[in-house]
Image: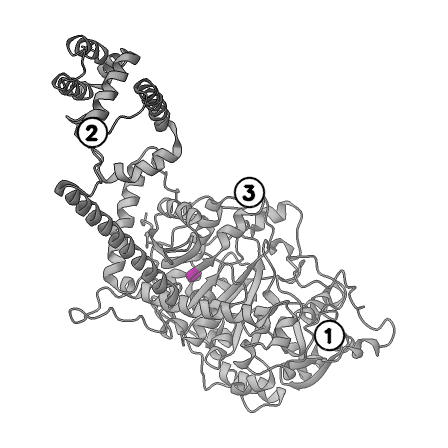
Amino acid sequence: MSVGLVGSKCTQESASMQDQGCWSAQARHVNEHWKVPISRRLSVCSSTPTSKDITMAWSLHRGVSGIRNSGNSNDFWDSQLKDKTEKEDLDRNRPSDPSYLSLRFPFRLFCPDIPSSKYGTTENGFAPDPFSIGSPRSWHRLTVLFLKLSLIVIVILALTGSFWWTLSISTSSRGLIFHGYRRLQEQLVSDLWDIGELSLGPPRMKEIDFCREESENHIPCFNVSENLAMGYSDGNEYDRLCGQGSRQSCLVLPPVNYKIPLRWPTGRDVIWVANVKITGQEVFTSGSLTKRMMMLEEEQISFRSASLMFDGVEDYSHQIAEMIGVRNESNFIQAGVRTILDIGCGYGSFGAHLFSKQLLTMCIANYESSGSQVQLTLERGLPAMIGSFNLNQLPYPSLSFDMLHCARCGIDWDKKDGIFLIEVDRVLKPGGYFVWTLPLTNVQSFLRNKEKQKRWNFVRDFAENLCWELLSQQDETVLWKKTGKKNCYNSRKPGSGPPICSKGQDIESPYYRPLQNCIGGTHSRRWLPIEERPAWPSRSNLNKNELALYGLHSEELNEDTANYKTAVRNYWSLLSPLIFSDHPKRPGDEDPSPPYNMLRNVLDMNARYGGLNAALLEAGKSVWVMNVVPRSGPNYLPLILDRGYVGLLHDWCEAFPTYPRTYDMVHAEGLLSLETSQHRRCTMLDVFTEIDRLLRPEGWVIIRDTAPLIGSARVLATRLRWEARVVEIESSSDERLIICQKPFLKRQAI
């Protein structure tokens, strides 16, 4: 029955409008109407009461309320009908009003399921106000609402306080990484779970295949047979030549009997024979000086860095110190010598001896298919790389090293009109030293061999035209000192030496450019004699005026140094439980810190200002760092070298000039972002396979970059069979840290 029909029936039965029982019944029918479903309710509401019915109903409702009627009754009913009609129009439009919804929403939130009949028309015809102050039920509702509001306010305050507390903690310990093995274990379990899901999901990522056995000591970009086929000869076939097909897309396995190197300082003087491509016969036929520096014992090669023999490395170092004018090699630093480029270094014994004197010696030698000097030096954990003077400049800027050393290095300095000596002059700092040890400088040798005397005379005269001063000559060793004054070049006789390079030729970012037949470095603002530079280790902390030469502010360097100090502490905290998890300790104690000599060398793939190197030295770690400056980024390599570190320029789309299994740790901060921002001719997988080639078995990889790139790196790590875990650095940061360890995968003996 519709509301209109009920109203008509009541009109017929109560013409005098005195009987209110019928309207009570009507109110009950209205309540029953709002209890029906929406679909039926819409059909019921389609039969609306007539104006007469509404007028009669409204008059009875107002009469029951006790409103006093006065004046013309017809005007009163008309006005009431008009008000009622306007109110219905307003009610129909109200739900679509956004402001109405916004005001009503909070109350609907607290009382979401209140039946309409409960607050609908009552027996007296009015909708009661649920928030009126009159009844106990209203007070109860207000109390419940107040409690709900209070609870929400408390929750909001708690969440806000927790947020600010977390923010303050993360700010006070910027860059904080997990400390303790237990938290790292939890992260590791989560990471392994994610990796398991990734490996099971379709499609499964295919693991990288292993290289063939003949590649276990191979270096891409150095292929003698291909160079010979292209017409290179006279030693040029051993030069570096990177083509499109020079990259390897496989994993290099170690030799069959490979063993993990011994820890420093033992590992510097004792290596495993099976780890390098050399035989005992090659050891004993490698020259008198080198042979006496080495002793073969079954599976090991022992190096005696200190010897009582005259030609021992200690006496030899004393001799060079006396020729410079200082008491011994411990006083090299007082003479301004910190970094040394050792050309044709043998097996690194000269640099190994000087390392304990805080002197850093970089060994460079030609590529050798067997019995490599560089490979054996690297196996000892000493700085070394493949480099050649034959065709191209070395990947160092001008004025890079304090001393260049050549002891029977096999280079004919008189060839090609002295162009090799010009390259030595380019990379030597003003006031630096060139040491050359060769039998042809002996007096008796001159008398016996006129050809050798002719070569010696050429080198002596050419060095003078380079403004080198011959300081001393003792036995087989000659020592020159490069001038620290630019006006020396102008005082030469016309045509008596190589010209000065133009400003366009004299650049600080050479990357295997052809050798230049002109004197470089004279246009550099870094021209400063080594004796006028601060002595090591003060040299590593440059002042404001010195930093201005490299376009840096002291605040930038200080911030970089502070960040890496924190990073080194955190790296040691992360690696200690992983390396020494079996170390005995009391229950509840923290994991022991790893020893200072845990690592021998680190390859920093994006060194920037050398901050990681500085932080490791300040923390007292017995480690040296190969600081690599990518060609795709800003060139701060001159700054790194002037701070007393070693490094080079490199394009990471090409193979690094070193043998496999070279470094204990590879570090890269921001490198992935730098490389992906360029239009590269290689992929991230190419870079990661190269990292795997450089890394020793059980070595570590630490990469810091943006979260998406770290996610991609994690997927690649699983393809390379690395054990990987991702660590969050800061709660408000987009950066992540991934720590990987290369497993020791043994090649099966045939």
Determine the image quadrant of residue 513: bottom right
Q: Is residue 279 above or below residue 113?
A: below
Q: Residues within 10 Å of mark 1 (few under 14, many from 20)?
A: some
Residue under the image location 33 percent in, 60 percent down: 166
At label 1, which amino acid type do we have?
A: Val
- Residue underneath mark 2: 65
SS for callout 2: loop
Q: Mark 1 vs mark 3: give the one in front.
A: 3
Q: Are marks 1 and 2 in contact (CB under 8 Å)?
A: no
Q: Mark 1 vs mark 2: give the one in front.
A: 2
Point out residue 738 in the picture as x, y percentages from the top left corner: 38, 54
Residue 110 in sight: yes
Mark toward the start of the polypeptide (2 vs 3) = 2
Residue nearer the viewer, 144 or 375 = 144
Q: CA distance from mark 1 to mark 2?
A: 125 Å
In the rendered structure, which segment of residues is drawn in magenta? 662-666
